[in-house]
Amino acid sequence: MNRTYELMFIVRPDMAEEDQDKLISTLESVVTSSSGQVKNVERMGKRRLAYKVRKFHDGIYILLTLEGSGSVIHELERRLRVTEPVIKFLTVRIDEEQKRLDKIKAIRDARRKTSVAAPAAEPTSETPAATA
Amino acid sequence: MADETRPTTAPSTEAAPTSERPDRGERRPPRSGPGGPGGRGEGPGGRKYFRRKKVCKFCVEKIEAINYKDIRLLAQFVAESGKIVPRRLSGVCTPHQRRLSSAIKQARNIALLPFAGRAS
């Protein structure tokens, strides 16, 4: 059962670019080894934290979008917890929300279409009634 | 006509609420309908009878995606103290407030928004 997750984590601001790459690639290998797949990696760059975390005021935000089962997340979170430069992380499941948004969008599109097509549809709906 | 007199009378009502009495008597008749029960609308600064109806920003602008990453959006519904603005003040409808508050809590968790106080 595959689900889509967003994994956002913050690493300490003084972490080197290569180390980040290394960390990301190890996480990716964790995901792929348990039949998941990483869809997107986004580095959001250095940001100011809203509050102090482990005595840091800034952090480098990294966002992974991935697909996989819950066990993948379990393993990823375990790894992040033991990885020293990672100061905070958050996993959010996004597939349900995405489904909801798609549904709303479909309804809106359909409504727009019917409002345009309504004058044309009216005569056709009348004719079967007349024949019956 | 009542609208024309309003700007001039407004300052005086703020200064002394009792002086509002005579001219209120002459303003009442034309709009006794909404003015009668809606006494609370007159409260702040002797304004008009009616208070602008609050509407849900998300319903009006058709924003469906309330995401924890969208700090610009979320920050509008967080008070200076870091608290989530209650529905009765912001006018957000219940389903959207529910999503909004969970998004704000997620954003707090990942240090995008503060738990208390301003973002340092």
Image (tube, rainbow, N blue to C red):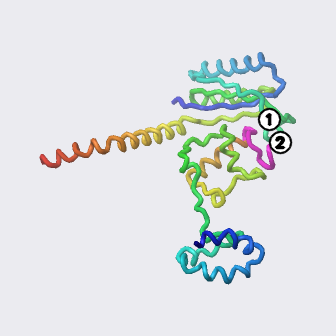
Camera-side residue: A124 or A24?
Answer: A124
Q: Chain of mark 1?
A: A
Prevailing secondary structure of the magenta residues? loop
- Picture coordinates of residue B111, whole percent (x, y): 75, 39
Q: Chain of mark 2?
A: B
Within 10 Å of the Cα at label 1, are there few (<14), some (14-19), or many (20+) other Cα atoms?
A: some
**Amino acid type, label 2:** Ser
In the rendered image, the vertical position of residue B37 relative to residue A123, given as above or below: below
- Left/right of residue A7 with respect to residue A112 in the rendered view: right
Boundaries of the magenta span:
B109-120
Give yes or no for residue B26 being in the magenta stretch: no
Mark 1, residue position: A48
For residue A115, what is the image quadrant?
Answer: top left
Residue under disc 1 on the same chain as residue under disc 2: no
- Left/right of residue A32 with respect to residue A125 in the rendered view: right
Figure quadrant of the C terminus of chain B: top right
Mark 2, residue position: B120
- Picture coordinates of residue B22, whole percent (x, y): 67, 83
For residue A88, what is the image quadrant?
Answer: top right
In the rendered image, the vertical position of residue B40 relative to residue A26, given as above or below: below
For residue B67, what is the image quadrant?
Answer: top right
Figure quadrant of the N terminus of chain B: bottom right
**Amino acid type, label 1:** Arg
Q: Residue at image x 58%, y 79%?
A: B28
Camera-side residue: B40 or A30?
Answer: B40
Residues tagged 1 and 2 counted as in contact (Cβ below 8 A): yes
Q: Residue at image x 67%, y 45%?
A: B74
